[in-house]
Amino acid sequence: MPRAARHHYHVYVVELADAVWNNARFRRCNPDYRLGMPFVYVGMTGLDPDLRFDRHKAGIQANAFVQEYGVRLRPDLYAVYNPMPYRAAVEMEVELGIALREKGYGVWQA
């Protein structure tokens, strides 16, 4: 009998420093940003989100915005969804980004 697949994928949200708003590319991707709302990066990983954040900051398979502006993880925005299977994580990464944008967040996704 085959072993059940372990659900070890995670979506995660990194809060970005306000200075990210000075980046024209980031601003262009967030035309509906609501003043005063946080700036975030939404990602998906097979690693523990804490380890993935550390890797971003160290420049290992890093997103440039997270490496330069990443402040901290925001588990209050993602922990409820984890862990999950790979396909669910891929879909949830997109859905979570859309949901946060709809609330007025400034969002970057890979």
Image: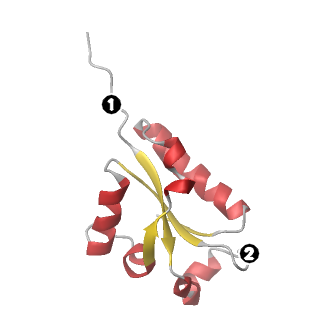
Q: Amino acid at mark 1?
A: Arg
Q: Nearer the viewer, residue 19 or 27?
A: 19
Q: Amino acid at mark 2?
A: Arg
Q: Are the residues flagged by discs 1 and 2 in contact, CB closer than 8 Å?
A: no
Q: Mark 1 and mark 2: span between their CA atoms?
A: 38 Å
Mark 1 falls on what kind of element? loop
Q: Quadrant of residue 40?
A: bottom right
Q: In the rendered image of this protein, does residue 45 appear above or below residue 38?
A: above
> What numbered label is drawn on residue 34?
2
Colouring rule applied to residues: secondary structure
Task: Say which residue appears at 32% left-offset and 21% top-offset.
Answer: 4
> What numbered label is drawn on residue 78?
none
Task: Say which residue appears at 53% left-offset and 43% top-offset.
Answer: 80
In the rendered image, which quarter contains the N terminus? Answer: top left
Task: Say which residue appears at 46% left-offset and 38% top-offset.
Answer: 87
Query: Which residue position is annotated with label 1?
Result: 6
Q: In the rendered image of this protein, does residue 51 appear above or below residue 59?
A: above
Residue 15 x, y percent position in the rendering:
51, 70
Residue 66 x, y percent position in the rendering:
42, 73
Q: Residue furthest top?
A: 1
Residue 91 x, y percent position in the rendering:
53, 44
